[in-house]
Amino acid sequence: MSAALDRSKILVQKFGGTSVGDAERIKRVAARIKSYYENGYLLVVVVSAMGHTTDELIKLASQISDNPPKREMDMLLSTGEQVSVAMLAMALHEIGVPAVSFNAQQIKIHTDARYSNARIEKIETDRLEKELAAGRICIVAGFQGIDEHQNITTLGRGGSDTSAVALAAALHAKECEIFTDVDGVYTADPNKVQGTRKHERISYDEMLELASLGAGVLHSRSVEFAKKYGVVIHVRSSFNFNTGTLVVPEEQIMEKLLVSGVTLKSDDARVSLNDIPDRPGIAAEVFHALAAQNINVDIIVQSTGKDNKNTISFTIPHKDLKQAREILELLLKNWGTGSASFDENIAIVSAVGVGMKSHSGVAASMFKSLADAGINIEMISTSEIKISCVIAKDRGREALQIVHDVFGLTQTA
Amino acid sequence: MSAALDRSKILVQKFGGTSVGDAERIKRVAARIKSYYENGYLLVVVVSAMGHTTDELIKLASQISDNPPKREMDMLLSTGEQVSVAMLAMALHEIGVPAVSFNAQQIKIHTDARYSNARIEKIETDRLEKELAAGRICIVAGFQGIDEHQNITTLGRGGSDTSAVALAAALHAKECEIFTDVDGVYTADPNKVQGTRKHERISYDEMLELASLGAGVLHSRSVEFAKKYGVVIHVRSSFNFNTGTLVVPEEQIMEKLLVSGVTLKSDDARVSLNDIPDRPGIAAEVFHALAAQNINVDIIVQSTGKDNKNTISFTIPHKDLKQAREILELLLKNWGTGSASFDENIAIVSAVGVGMKSHSGVAASMFKSLADAGINIEMISTSEIKISCVIAKDRGREALQIVHDVFGLTQTA
């Protein structure tokens, strides 16, 4: 570790694939970075692959194989970010700012060996600190790492967020700025709800729940990482200089809202297994079979009926419905009893807030407000800081606004 | 070095960008590699970037800068080969052959730090030997290396040939096979001359002269490398299984031909500087100024006239004519005397052969044969194993056939 570096001046910034989608946009990002550089910041900039590069590489591989080896897929995909970092470094040079690009092999971003879904274990900082000390901006390829044998790994969708947070942790940076196309984290999606407010601060745990509920601002693993290492994330717009939302430890939030965010998820389907045997291990059998095919199950409700028969209902992504149907029909055939039903016309409306921990009655308020509007709740799932309700899809938008209103989040102009 | 490896079974094979131009071609290359694998060879396969990838990346960079930093350019261009190696490894897996891809960082192909034109200094073989011993084919990205600080370098046009030869040297491989679109090295270009013959063997020195005369089968630096380390190069077709041409030390050639190859180069122009001062340093001044702009001068003839005036004539590539004209006009202006003339309508016909070393009269035969046909020789240049004549461009093809005939190279069917 270089003693000369003033860590309070180190900023890690992350720009996504849309921000570096073509040469013009890369130039715009470079101009923005220059303004920070001129203000004396020591900058490490993480970028994703340009625009649709990753999708195009996946398409290229599909011309060779339907099921390419994951190691080779990661080797292929990691080139996308390497192109971006070189282009951005060139753009900075072009406007007179010294910059140098790096891939994960050069920095040594160590991960485990889980190709396509690797986890960062350790980042070496020698080279970065040397370059920062020399007054150069470091442009680092996001989304990628290396395992202990120098094989290239990738971190999964949204992995560049995690690269940025991990670099900020390793460098003890002041902050990790995630530039995106929104101004920060809102109480709900402003495109779907009226009177939403932007948070100045939100806790790691709330952000984690919101991320997993599909409020797609941040990749959930990056938030886990930030929580673990106490990295302050600043979610802000790449189009303006407004302050965005800081994602921080819960202790740093003064006013703990009962509910800080409301979300609507419309890409799930409900599966019900009716009249299945009521014996130990049945649920495990079902969810094990689904997990083996990488099908993510979200909300689960089980109820015991009469005559030793059970009903299990759960939600899965639409896209996995066909595969789940095949798996479940096989299970039903083996059991020799029961039936499966599927419902694609559902939505999940959720409320998230750390304030729930210390307040009762939050769930009741939510249920009542929906009931008052004649919206039927089909399934319920709760955690310490989250309540989710499965409702009919065609009432989703309405339910979202109702819940946003009932918890006092709605601003009147 | 692994003791278990039978080096006589190690083959290094190189496939160029055209051979891996799209998914279908990559599959064809994979099928070919499989046939060697099934015959018990231990294979290291070097590939170039797919088709026009490198040109496309250069175009992408040009949207950012007219003069991008060379380090970043190499970072960008090296992604092309990384895509190819991943794709080829996938294609091999798809047909049941274990293969693993590597970039230069993973193998550790050490070069000097001359970005865009680096020279290979050392190649580590541990990983390759381990994979070969485990029965896997190693697919290695050509054209690239790393300097001592892990920066990515590239080896210049045709650099993948050099990567392949250097790998063959480092691994003490049996042979380095360069797959191309011709069957081997011919006495002349079969598309331009009738009755050409394919060489079974040709010496490094002849191949070097032929390469620099534009017989584009091999990159000249790869031949230098092969000569230095005694690597046998096998130039052969990627379209059939015919034996091609072996490039070997001169000692291994039994029948030393007086002339082994005849070439025609039509992309040069002649520049003459007339009535320029006859004083020391004038020639140095001219060629230094041209070299500073990376203009390659080929044949040079200087003659002293009367009144302390000189004439210098030389050939340069067409493409550099405009730039050379500017440079020379500036020099003439400084000298205050002399004039420049330019002739684009020239061709260079050359004969190459190690047999020339021990035989006189070769040049005379060549001059006489051209004279007999009424072809005027404008300039002459010779080396120990080469004679070049500058003639009128519209007589080029005819001269090529005449020289091919006069040295007894022409086969009658």
Image: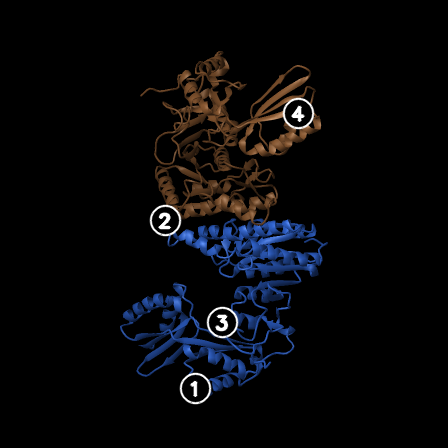
Chain colours: A blue, B brown
User: Is label 4 on the same chain as label 3?
Assistant: no
How far apart in space, not on screen, are marks 4 and 3 (Cα)?
Answer: 74 Å
User: In the rendered structure, which amino acid carries the disc numbered 1?
Assistant: Gly
Residue matched to label 2: B94
Residue contact at pointers 2 and 4, CB within 8 angstroms: no
To which chain does the residue with label 3 belong? A
Q: What SS does tag 4 mark? A: helix
Can you identify the residue that label 4 sits on?
Answer: B284
Dot 1: element = loop
Q: Give the crowd class for mark 4: few <14, some 14-19, many >=20 residues within 10 Å.
A: few
Between the C-alphas of marks 3 and 1, the distance is 24 Å
Discs 4, 1 touching: Cβ within 8 Å: no
In the rendered structure, which disc, 2 or 4, sits on the residue that comes first in sequence? 2
Front residue of A305/A143: it is A143
Amino acid type, callout 2 = Glu
Q: In the picture provided, is A27 more to the left or to the right than B184?
A: right
- The answer for which chain carries disc 4 is B
Q: Residue furthest right?
A: A4
**Earlier-in-chain disc, 3 versus 1:** 3
Disc 3 residue type (three-letter): Leu
What is the spatial separation of the Cα atoms under label 2 and label 1, in whole angstroms?
56 Å
Q: Examine the rendered structure and indicate whether residue A328 appears above or below residue B309.
A: below
Q: Residues within 10 Å of mark 3 (few under 14, many from 20)?
A: many
